[in-house]
Image: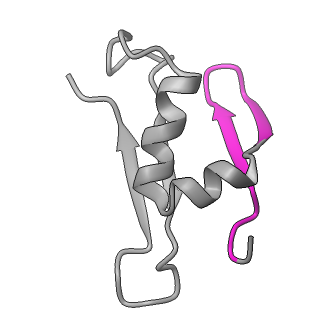
Amino acid sequence: MNGYAGKFLEVDLTKGICSSLTIEEAKLKKFIGGSCLAASLYPEKYKLQADPLAPESPLMVMYGPMVGSRFPRYIAFCRSG
C-alpha cells in the first residue's frame, strides 16, 4: 500500500529492546488511520486487564493517512484507568 511501510516498531524501554513487526496488508486496508489501527492492534498484542501505569501497558504513537496535511499528523493511544 502506498504511504504505509507495513511495519510496527515496538520499543521496550524496560529491557532496552527494539523489534519490528510486520502488519499484514489486509489489516492496513481494513483499519485506515492511526487510531483505528492502534485500536485493532492493542487487544491482539497487549493485556487489556493490565494496570494503565504498569510497564507492560504500552503507549502507542501512530501516524495516520493525513500526514503532510494540516490535519493532526499522529495520535497517542494508550489504556486509561
- How was the colour assigned to the protein in this rendering? one colour
Q: Residue furthest left?
A: 81
Spot occupied by residue 4 in the image (x, y as percentages of width and height): 69, 67
Residue 9 lies in the magenta stretch: yes
41 relative to 51, above or below: below
21 relative to 29, above or below: above
Spot occupied by residue 66 in the image (x, y as percentages of width and height): 47, 79
Residue ID at (48%, 18%): 55
Residue ID at (35%, 9%): 49
Question: How many numbered markers are drawn?
Answer: 0
Spot occupied by residue 64 in the image (x, y as percentages of width and height): 49, 67
37 relative to 51, above or below: below
Q: Which one is nearer the viewer's eye here, 20 or 31?
A: 31
Residue ID at (40%, 53%): 35
Residue 27 lies in the magenta stretch: no
Q: Quadrant of residue 25?
A: bottom right
| Quadrant, the C terminus | top left
74 relative to 46, above or below: below
Relative horizontal placement of residue 3, taking residue 22 as reference (left or right): left
Q: Quadrant of residue 53?
A: top left
Relative horizontal placement of residue 18, taking residue 35 as reference (left or right): right
| Quadrant, the N terminus | bottom right
Segment colored magenta: 3-21
Spot occupied by residue 15 in the image (x, y as percentages of width and height): 70, 20
Residue ID at (36%, 36%): 78
Q: Quadrant of residue 44?
A: top right
